[in-house]
Amino acid sequence: MRLLHTMLRVGNLQRSIDFYTQVLGMTLLRTSENPAYKYTLAFVGYGSNPEHAELELTYNWGVDHYELGTAYGHIALAVPDAAAACAKIKAAGGKVTREAGPVQGGNTVIAFVTDPDGYKVELIEQAQST
């Protein structure tokens, strides 16, 4: 078994595509529409299946807001420099909700940003492997 994708319901598909591609550097991999069930899908990621897990952005036509609830946590992304990533995200109009710094009680450097629909994205500083 392997992770294929994570699905997020979004209130404005283009706004979400712009955030994940322009602010977080993902690529728009593919889109599809289902007129019978009135939804549009956009898959984004740093690569496509089977080598990479993807993020499925689902826009249900006519729904512009969702209650996120208390069960959902966050998506985590590895970055080589969390502070630099935060600066770049802010410069691109993204919202940093926790600046880069060590996790409480540990040494791992993390930060948090929020996407346009309020979903949390954790940035975890990890040295790049070659």
Image: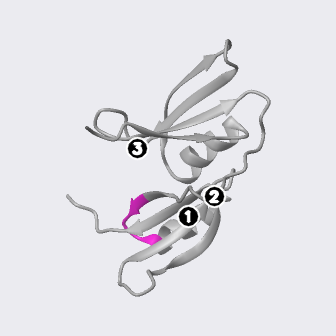
Q: What's the distance in space between the residues labelled 3 and 2, CA to CA?
A: 18 Å
The image quarter containing residue 113 is bottom right
Residue 45 against residue 121 in the figure, above or below:
above
* Numbered disc in front, either 1 or 3: 3
Where residue 52 appears, as percent x and y from the top left, is 33, 40
Provide the secondary structure element on which disc 3 rests. Answer: loop
Seen in the picture, residue 3 relative to 68 is either above or below; the reply is above
Say which amino acid is labelled 2.
Ala
Disc 3 crowd rating (10 Å Cα; few below 14, some 14-19, many 20+) is some
Q: Which residue is mark 2?
A: 92
For label 1, the SS is helix
Q: Nearer the viewer, residue 66 or 16?
A: 66
Where are the magenta residues, as a range?
Answer: 77-82
Direction from residue 6 to residue 53 in the image, left or right: left
- Is 92 positioned to the left or the right of 112 in the image? right
Residue found farthest to the top = 36
* Residue at the disc numbered 1: 88
Secondary element type, mark 2: loop
Q: Which tag, 1 or 3, sits closer to the chain's start?
A: 3
- Horizontal and vertical percent position of residue 95: 66, 64
Q: Residue at 36%, 66% (x, y): give it.
A: 80
Q: Amino acid at mark 3?
A: Tyr
Quadrant the C terminus occupies: bottom left
